[in-house]
Amino acid sequence: MKHRILLILAAALLFPFGAHARTQADTLRVSDIFTTHIIFNTDLIYADLSNSQACAAKILEQSKNMMALKARSPFATPLSVSALESNGAMHTYIVIFEEHPETLVYDMRAGAVRADSITSNENSKDAGKKKAKGVKSSQKGSPEAGLYRRFDAPLLQDVVAAPQSLWHISTRQYDIEVTCTNILSYSDITYIVFSIKNGSGVSYECPDATFVVESKKRSRKSVVYDRNIFPKSRYGTASCAPKQTSHIGYSLDKVSLAKDQVLRVYFYEEGGQRELVLTIDQADINHAKTALQK
């Protein structure tokens, strides 16, 4: 408690709220299954939850401009989370519980724009009006689903429903097969779609996939830096009932790999020991097909 008070006092001295700070309020949806991330313009120097018993929050050590939120258990009463950036910007959000939130990443950086600002069947005049509206919303820090830099990006659910074009990227263990069925790109967005086929007699519960850029070769003499990639949004489920097949797709900021790097996707079973790892090479990423707008 004493440490928190000192942080507040230090922030008040460095950034007088009357002169520099600005406050904004939005609604975030968190789950006790998935982790929600918020990305800010600058590093965070202070964060506080109104109810830390219902939800957990932390500033990432690797990227101090990112905050991770996860509910400890389902809660009915909304709570609030506040964050102070090093540039003096103060943010306050209302947090509600949702078991399967559509958005796992809220990008509050300047210039982030919602993909749902425009639908594919709008004419150019309406599109222009909604484009301006989308920019205005992003400046307020609106955390709606699907944050993209382009307004005409294909919908993720349409990408997941597209016919399979890849067959060579797969792994099979424990009578469970995971296949990367499509890798598509559009502007600075990378779409990756997976199918999970459960041939066992036990259900496979996987909350979400984990994306990590890793080095192909590891030796004791070399220093290896792994880098996690956080999806912008997802559609579908990675869990699968016995003798069934499920599909899940992710949209990520532009993914690029060096010659000695691979993208490994980890599927960790919740409450079990079955772990599946899929490796995507640089050539698979670089040769991604262009996603066509619907």
Image (cartoon, rainbow, N blue to C red):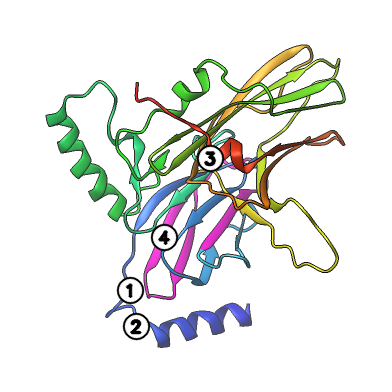
Q: Residue at x 55, y 68 (%)?
A: 64
Q: Which residues are magenta?
A: 66-94
Q: Which mark is residue 21?
A: 1
Three-letter amino acid code at the position of disc 1:
Ala
* Front in this rendered view, residue 130 or 48: 130
**Callout 4: SS:** strand
Three-letter amino acid code at the position of disc 4:
Thr
Q: Which residue is mark 2?
A: 16
Q: CA distance from mark 3 to mark 4?
A: 40 Å
Q: Earlier in the sequence, mark 1 or mark 4?
A: 1
Say whether residue 85 is magenta.
yes
Q: CA distance from mark 1 to mark 2?
A: 7 Å
Q: Residue at x 63, y 40 (%)?
A: 74
Q: Which residue is mark 4?
A: 92
**Callout 3: SS:** helix
Q: CA distance from mark 1 to mark 4?
A: 12 Å
